[in-house]
Every structure is written in C-alpha cells, then in structure tokens.
Image (cartoon, grey):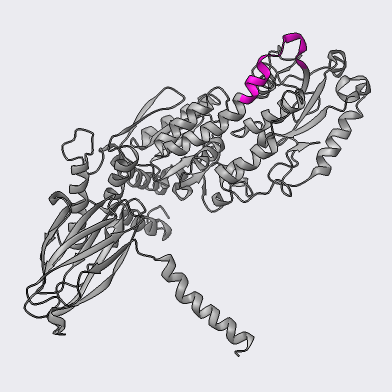
Amino acid sequence: MNRRCLLALALLLIVAVPASASAMDGTPGDVDGDRVLTSAEYASAALTYLDAAYMGGAGDLTRTDIRDAAWVSAHWDGRPCEITDSSGRTTTLYRPLRRVVTFSGESLETLRSLGFDMEKVVAVDKYSHGKKTFFPECQGKANVGSIWSPDMEQVLILRPDAVFLYATISTATCDDIQKRLEASSPGIRVFRFDCFKPATYPGEIRTIASAVGQKERGEEFAAFYESTMNRIRDGAAGIPDDERVRVYFEYWFDYTTVAAGAGYNEKTRLAGGVNPFATGTAEYPVVDPEAIIVTDPEVVVKLAGQGLAVGGYAGHDIAAFDAIRAGMLERPGWSSISAVKDDRVYVIHSDILGGAQHFIGTAYLAKWFYPDRFADLDPHAVHQRYLTGFQGIDFDLASEGTFVYP
Amino acid sequence: MMSLPANHLLCIALLLMVVPAAACASPVTRSLSTAEPGAGEVFTVLLSIEGMTLGGVVETLPAGYAFVATDLADDRVLARGQQVAFAVMNDSRITYQVRAPASGSGDITGRWEDFLGESDGQVAASHVAADGIEAPVESGGGDPVPPAAQETGSPFAVLAAVAALLLASGRGGRR
C-alpha cells in the first residue's frame, strides 16, 4: 500500500469514527445520564439550544442534537430503543438513524414500506441501484456493491450510522462485512435482517419499525402482510394430504426445480401445494425430464426473473411470458401431464415471490392451486395496494410490469 | 380583454408569488391584543401554532418593550434582554404579556424552528406603537440569525477536505 492510500485510509477513519461515535454517547439533553430524556430535560435542552442559537447564550447543543432529542422524545418516549435483530444481537439506539446504508434490497424495501425518509438512505447495494423503476429515488445514491463484493471504502466515506445486512443467508460474507465495519468504525450499528422469509418477516417489520420510530405504520403494514398470509395459511390448513395439489415448480433454468431448503418450496407448501421433488438434497436440483412426466403434476409454475430476465417491474412484456409458457407446453411428453391437459401451467416473476413481496406471489400460487378455496383472494389488488399504499410508488399494474401469466 | 400570452404571463406571475409563499408557510402566527397599547400598558401577544409539535420560538421585542409573563410553565421559557424563547411542546397556542414603554414603536419579530419537521423560518413581524405614536427607538437586537453555521464546518470535514486537495494535487503521495 503506498503512502497515498495509507493517508486516504487514515482520513477515512478520522472522518468516520467521530460521526458514528456520537451515536453511542446517549441521547442529547439527558443531563442526569439515567437514559431517560424526561419532558423537563427536553424542555431545558430546547431552551439551551435556542439560547445558544439565537440569543447569544453559551450552550453547546447543536441543531442536530436538539432535533435528535425531539425525535427520541416523540418516537421513543424519551428512552433508548433496544433493537434485537434477526441474528439475535441487541443494539441500543440513543438517536434516530440519519445515515443508512443497505446491502439488502429487502431491508431497503421494508424501510420504504415503513415510511422511512429515503433521503436518509445514503447508499444501497448494486442490485437495488440497478432497479430504476422500483427504486427510482436510489439512482442518485451511492452504490456500495454487493455483500459478495462490498465497496468498504465507499461505505466508510459515507459515515453511516447504520448498515443493514442479511441475517441468515450468506452469513459468512455478511459476518465479514460486519467485522470490518465494527473494527474501523466502532459507532456503526450493523443490523441483520432477512425481510424475505414468511416465518420471520412480521417480526422483522415490527422491529425495524421501532428502530425508525414508525411503530404505528409498522403495525399497519404487518397487519396488511399478515392478513394475506393468514388467509393463505387458513385456506390451506384444512386440505387433507391426499387432496393437496401436486406442483412442479421450475426455477429460471429448464428442468431445475426447488427442494426443501429453497424459499420457493416453502411458499409452494404454504399455498397448499405438494412438491414431488422436495426431498432433494440440493436446494435447486436438476431433475430428469422423464421424472416430471412420471409425477404428473397437476399444476406447473415457472419462475421468471434474474436468470430468465423478462417482465417484472423492469418491463411490460406479456408476449415473453406467453413464449416461455408455450415452450413448456411443447416439451416432449408434456401433453400427457395433467397440468397441461387442464391448462394449469403458469409463469410468475421472482419480483413478487422471492423477496419482501413474497406474500403477493404466494397469494397467486394459492389461487392457482385452489381457485375455489381462494375465490375471494385478489392478489392483483393486494399487489396494487402494496405499491400505492406502502411503497408509495406510481406504478399502475394494469399497464406496467408483467408478473404472472396467464 | 387581455391576449392569451398576457393571460399566461399573469398566471405565471401569480404562481411565482403564491407558490413560494405556500411552500414556506409558517407554522407560527402572531396576533396582538392591541397594536397601540397605552404608555406602560401590559398587552397580550398570542402565538398560534399549527403543525409543529416539538420546536421552539424566539421572539424579539422592540427596545423599551419588556416581557412580563407567559402562560407557559417557567421551565419552558427563557428571557434574555429583548428576546424570549419558548420551548414548544404540543402547544397550539402560547400567550405572553408585554409592557409597553412610555413611548416608542417598532416590530416584534420572531423565528421558529420545528425540531421534528426539521425546518425553520421567521414569524411575520407585528408592528406596535405606544399610544399609537410612531416614535422609533433604537433596535432591540434585531432578528436573530439562524444557526446554519452550527451544522457545517466540522473539523473533520475540513481536515478531510484539505487532505483531499493535497491528494488531488499529488502532494500527498510519492511522485
């Protein structure tokens, strides 16, 4: 490393450490240090600030200090906020998050669902950065790469007070990023959340909502999410095992399916489907084409998305989905499969099944598997409400994007 | 009747006048029980607050006018010279009393800061004249200056900027 690099690194540390260290000092205005900013302490702090700012007084509270104190008083009742993330680690927050970096698009999306001020997200991962239609406000933000190739220098330059990483996937790489961040800037809060797993997502919504002072919004969003997921669980709960629909779920690549460890299998199961290939040891096993015909699936679901890049939020391309489906129908021997004979072959985009929007895709699966049981479920309406009511983006499903076919 | 371009120009001019005013709408407005108090009379100032839950207001009185009391609790008020600071905590109105001098006129000015909304601005000035007689007196301190400087110029940022310049000029590394 040459002298210039060393100097640059040293400067990064100088700049980064003080910014984040202040987050560890307690809430501004808590003069007795008992970790509770009382109403009287807050009032005193406000006057001290106003005196120094406008009246020639000598207080040392900055504008950011008093704004943070007001925020803590309003959103956390004057107390520190203890956040236990999905890795089980508890972090105490004394101030609101002002400079957030997300390495996880799912956490970013959840923050937006919760009404977090996106101006306070200073950098995002490269995948979110590339989603121009879904995250238009992120186009001007810094790009910190991915968890597999993080731009640590960029992260430190940005002096974040919080960084979001995944909790249970790619744990080794996320652990490494966390270790490096905490070593170079001890005040940085690293939060680990998945935000794509049905089992943990409602809890994660509420936890993140507390961290960003949006508890009411968190309850509203969690209730919206749970109303869809509980409807699916309840609807599928009473189906006897021998009446469950056999489903062949095909990943982006031909004849590649999903097995027990894959999230898509979990969603197939939640929607009441049975995956004949669930017992494979690999998450995404390649299957013998003949084996698919032998199992005679009643429903076939094909995944479009990153590895089969058509549709989703990036493009309105029904013809491409139709072509994918037509190609499957013409596969050798498939004319004898029940799903083909009964016209129950579907294409779904991973945008609504793989990440934070998995509840929308799972609703489509349930509807396809059991149209009578889920006659009242309207995944399209759920999707539009999510985009308009929670994501706050101007996206009309009637004319934009392609997510399911037919 | 005006021609179409003239109509357009008028609309644009109106928009230019209205839009900034709407965008900078103050959450604090002031009204006085009287703008012409008698000599030595105590009059009431009402600050009406809308859409600001946690914030502050600093009022500056004309010279000779004296702050007397307020309906806010003592621990939410600070008076210093011609200035009075109020800590706003879910208040929709704050009243305070001012004693007029034997003579003199001037403006009551003010600044507000919305700590939660992270915005600030001025409260429109209110003119007051003892006995209704315009008799300007020396300034009571003027309108306070917003503390913009407090948020900038951290020593670390300055240090980084200087170093960056050094690096950019090639002086920080080996040639």
Q: Is residue A3 left or right of residue B14?
A: left
Image quarter of residue A360: top right
- Write the residue at 30% across / 37% down: A77
For the N terminus of chain A, which image quadrant? top left
For the C terminus of chain A, which image quadrant? top right
Q: Is residue B92 magenta?
A: no
Image quarter of residue A366: top right
Q: Residue furthest bottom?
A: B1
* Residue B158 percent location from the top left of the image: 31, 57
Q: Is residue A309 left or right of residue A26?
A: right
- Write the residue at 80% across / 31% down: A346
Q: Nearer the viewer, residue B132 or A164?
A: B132
Q: Is residue A58 visible?
A: no
Position above or below: B32 against A271: below
Please state the extent of the stretch shown in magenta in the rendering.
A231-245
Q: Nearer the viewer, residue A215 or B72?
A: B72
* Residue A329 percent location from the top left of the image: 89, 29
Position above or below: B74 against A382: below
Position above or below: A153 against A232: below
Q: Nearer the viewer, residue B165 or B154?
A: B154
